[in-house]
Image (tube, rainbow, N blue to C red):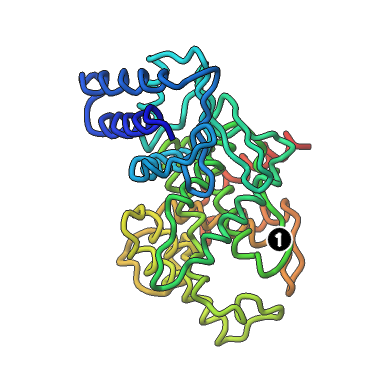
Amino acid sequence: MTDPQKQFIAALTIAISNCSLYAKEHELIEESAKKTFALLNAFLDDRTEMMIIENELVINKLPMRDARLHSTNLVKRFKRKGISRIDFVKGVTAAEIKQFITDLSTTDEGIQTYPHIKTGVVDVGTGSSATGSSDVALDLDRASSFTEDQVEKLKEIYHTVSPFKKLKITDLEAIVARFVATISREISVLKLLSPVKSYSNYTYVHSINVAVLSIFQAESLGLRGKVLHDVGLSAVLHDVGKLFISKEILEKKGKLDEKEFAEITHHPSYGAGYLANIDGIIRMAPIVAFEHHRRFDGTGYPTLTMNGKNQHIASQIVAISDFFDALRSWRPYRKSLDTREVLVLMKKNAGTDFNPMLVDNFVRAFLTALAKQE
């Protein structure tokens, strides 16, 4: 790796940090942006590509191992935005670089579009990549395979979980950011829901589907930015407690007996306890993990006292998504229901199991999406 590339990575990282600490008008931000722009131009030809390959930052096919500290920080930033490839094209301006730095420094805004900076994702499995004018360049026809890829990523992350090993939150944030960006581009939510192809994969597929449906709900309610992202992250983690339930119970093909069901009812407590001990976890995540089987009327499980508090709004959103996906998914002990049948049941349980306002919003938004697809 050449010195200009190392210096560029260091300057970009410092510029992002400055943006996080100072007001946008601060002279230090202007100076660091100009320095970053000058260093980029020192090695920019027609196009310079920056990619994340297996958590390694690569510039023009050269690994950034000599700038490990700075590259690690950038990888985390990019993943939080749901991008794994950035192309800087000849003609890029100082103003574009400054805006790009500003966008990367925030947690509640997506990456904007720029004339000479293209962002996208790298598909490591096929060796291909996609760039475009938005932070996720996804072909509509590839939506289902895109979701399957995210299911596999979640499975890999969850396989590292143990009481003594913490989740890779930045990797999960990247998954959520991709779905937030994809749903924001008006890709039909129906195309992003993945079917359960094997019973052993149910927990992973269900977690992704619940995240997709929760992001869909939250956005239809007008939520944006960090709150939308937090709802998605909490949704994908809602069933993490099931990782501490035996596979014999989780993958049982018949109906659970009373003792087995009692064990299942502990997974919200297991999940909340596990997440609460992860440094830097958003506060919403353990709350949703604990409450997603609580009902709107205060019943459900866990049966521990809620101290008179109502179920968190994010938990109410996730509970609707959880119910919808569970009933529309095939299980060995029962058939799947048609989506319209599930919506009818959901309406029937509004006011007891679910927040009536959220049910009305979900049904309205989902039927609109269904009509568009048909």
The residue at the point 53 percent across, 35 percent down is: 85
The residue at the point 48 percent across, 72 percent down is: 267
Circle 1 residue: 196
| Residue positioned most to the right | 374
Image position of 10 with respect to 299: above or below: above
Return the residue nearer the eye: 314 or 104. Answer: 104
Q: Is residue 341 visible?
A: yes
Return the residue nearer the eye: 13 or 44. Answer: 44
Residue 130: x %, y % from top left: 63, 33
Q: Secondary structure at mark 1?
A: loop
Image position of 42 with respect to 130: above or below: above
Residue 159: x %, y % from top left: 53, 66
Q: Is residue 105 visible?
A: no
User: Which quarter of the rendered picture does the N terminus lie within?
Assistant: top left
User: Which quarter of the rendered picture does the C terminus lie within?
Assistant: top right
Left or right, 344 with respect to 335, comes to left
The residue at the point 66 percent across, 48 percent down is: 125
Left or right, 48 with respect to 40, comes to right
Left or right, 197 with respect to 25, comes to right
Amino acid of disc 1: Val
* Count of all numbered marks drawn on residues in the image: 1
Label 1: few (<14), some (14–19) or many (≥20) C-alpha neighbours in 10 Å: some
Residue 43: x %, y % from top left: 44, 22
Left or right, 251 with respect to 291, comes to right
Q: Quadrant of residue 370?
A: top right
Image position of 237 with respect to 118: above or below: below
The residue at the point 43 percent across, 59 percent down is: 288
Image position of 11 with respect to 91: above or below: below
Return the residue nearer the eye: 206 or 175. Answer: 175
Residue 178: x %, y % from top left: 54, 41
